[in-house]
Amino acid sequence: MEMGSTTSSNGTSSLMWFFKDKGFDDNSINEMFRKCKRLEGVRRERASENWSYLQSIGIQERKLPFVISKCPKILTLGLNDKLIPMVECLSTLSTKQREVASAITKFPHILSHSLEEKFCPLLAFFQALGVPEKQLGKIILLNPRLISYSIEHKLSEIVEFLSGLGLVKDGRIGKVLVKHPFIMGYSVEKRLRPTLEFLKSIGLTELNVQTVVMNFPELLCRDVDKILQPNFVYLKQCGFQDRQIAALVTGYPQILIKSIRNSLEPRIKFLVDVMGRSIDEAADYPIFFQHSLKRTLESRHKLLRQKNVDYSLREMLDCNQKKFLLKFG
């Protein structure tokens, strides 16, 4: 055996003991060496130093094995020239220290990306869209996987898609991304466009679509066949007209993703059977579906019935509990 390979195998065996010591089993150790060839040349001291550093920034000890097995390369990186600068940059974006630890736990690979080549261009990209500096952290720490996406191919395509909806002024695209950073992980052609086409097909105008995307961008990310279509069919079966469904979706987009059995059905039953009202009233006031059945609808209806007051859904629901009691109580 040549001298070089002895050193490398000694290094490997001392690292093996390091992993055993940290509670990894043989399978996951072998998997890490297979995943990351650079581990073979890493000295135990470096691995140990990086491990301690990750603990010191608030990553829980029980989660560290998961973080390292996801991205073993972290143990090979220079502490002062790679890990610390990246963590410090992430810290400037956060308001709470634990946000950084939680972002790294969610997507450990964020530490292996280059500050100059990936992180800084990503920040510049969002700033150009009008995302306020305070909100940059929210986007990246909530969805740290963003750092691995290509700006040219993936992120620009999403932005182009959103521009095509007419969301061009007043940093509106930035607002959508802050509201739901995960939208950038979806494919335009496989998910966002089919959902958009579905919304148009059920009668939403361009302006309606803009309202929906500004208020609840998550709707665009949902599967038409599995989630949206069944809810649409259910609303039709309840007797809502097409134009009413378009109004409901515009006023309360979540209506297309709420559970039929646990959310929509009990509220419609309550409206019709208990309150003795027609579904047209809910179509005129979609926010009806947002209110808690027990806490708000049932308790307010009961009070109004005792008082024998005549009221519309809007009057009953368009205020907080304190104002409601002042008005009717």
Image (cartoon, rainbow, N blue to C red):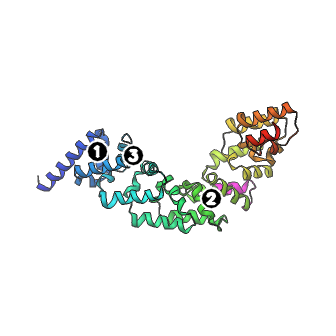
Residue at 64% across, 49% down: 224
> Is 287 or 70 nearer to us in this picture?
287
Gap in angstroms between the C-alphas marked 2 and 3 = 38 Å
Q: From the image, state whether disc 2 or disc 3 is nearer to you.
A: 3
The answer to which of 10 and 301 lies nearer the viewer is 301
Question: Is disc 3 placed on a helix, strand or loop?
Answer: loop
Residue 136 locus on image (x, y percent):
52, 60
Residue 50 to residue 299: above or below: below
Residue 105 spot, x, y in % from top left: 42, 48
The kind of secondary structure element at disc 2 is helix
Q: Name the residue under label 3.
A: 59
Task: Evaluate if marks 1 and 3 touch, with contact meaning CB atoms under 8 Å apart.
Answer: no
Q: In which quarter of the image is residue 211?
A: bottom right
- The three-letter code of the residue at mark 3 reads Ile
| Horizontal arrangement in the rendering, residue 236 relative to residue 70 (left or right) | right
Give the amino acid at mark 2: Arg
**In the picture shown, does residue 130 fall above or below 16?**
below
Question: Which range of residues does the magenta coloring cover?
Answer: 195-206
Crowd around label 3: few <14 · some 14–19 · many ≥20 (10 Å): many
Identify the residue position indicated by label 2 in the image: 193
